[in-house]
Amino acid sequence: MSTTLGGPRPDAAAYMMRAAASAAGRSYKQELMELLDVHPGQIALDVGCGPGTDLPTLAEHVGVSGTVIGVDRDPAMLAEARRRTRELPAVQIREADVHALPVEPGTVDRAKIDRVLMHVTDPAGVLEQLHLVTRPGARIGLAEPDWDTLVVDAEDLGTSRAFTRYTASDVVRHATIGRSLARYAERAGFAIETVRATTPVFLDFQDADHTLGLGRNMQQALQNGYIDEVRGRRWFTSLSEQPFFASFTLVTVICSR
């Protein structure tokens, strides 16, 4: 078992697909799709589709008479999305910034944004764009984590708390977007239908290190002088030497146009 602090950032597409394939990822994604209630013949939009993890599922729901549009700006992500959907004629992949969606106004029946708003420059602007391209009666699914709720069990509780504070303040652009999703959506003109909070639990250190960036983010915190070097390294090493537990809150909002 590796307990190396830091290390190179993982390939983004592989990282997202592994996260989606985890038990926590499968659970909330299944719930999101069920609540989104996609029907045959509809136009479904995946904003920030990444490597296309959810495009085949959306294509299955819209059927041969529907259309799925995946939008992302990362060429590597789009290449993987095209590879995964090359035999799915209902799927269209479009390269664009999500702040300027390449979709005709008032045409989308179903849309989803999954763990994207925490990274964008202007979450409110993206939701305003989404309001523009959806038609009256459309249903929208939003899912974002709240990194301020990240907990990592360790005897050194102070360093665990410092790690969470660093993650929320320095690592993720909009770290608390999860708790604000309903407010942002309502301000963009959507009607809130459902708000749910789930708590993904990690009991495997390696899994959590990969998904939560424990070693990578701790290394940054040490380099920036946010956490004491000796305490930080001792904290990270200790995580693999005892039963492991970490969790955070993920918020799902279903709203309508």
Image (tube, rainbow, N blue to C red):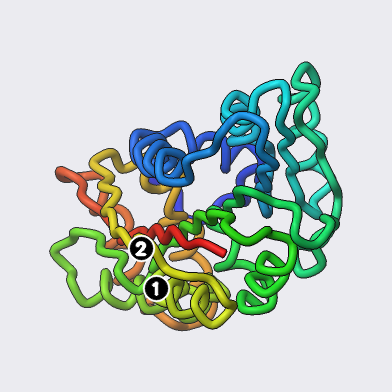
Q: Residue at x 15, y 43 (%)?
A: 243
- Identity, as a three-letter code, of the amino acid under mark 1: Glu
Q: CA distance from mark 1 to mark 2?
A: 6 Å
Q: Residue at x 47, y 70 (%)?
A: 191
| Front residue (pair 169, 108) | 108
Q: Which residue is mark 2?
A: 233
Residue 1: percent from the left, percent from the top? Answer: 36, 34
Closest to the observer, 158 or 172: 172
- The quarter of the rendered structure image containing the C terminus is bottom right
The amino acid type, in three-letter code, at marker 2 is: Arg
Q: Between residues 242 and 211, which one lies in front from this camera angle?
A: 211
Residue drawn at (39%, 68%) of the image = 147
Q: Residues within 10 Å of mark 2 (few under 14, many from 20)?
A: some
Q: Is residue 161 above or below residue 74?
A: below
Residue 70 lies left or right of residue 208; in this view the side is right
Q: Picture quarter containing residue 126? A: bottom right
| Residue 47 spot, x, y in % from top left | 67, 54
Residue linked to disc 1:
229
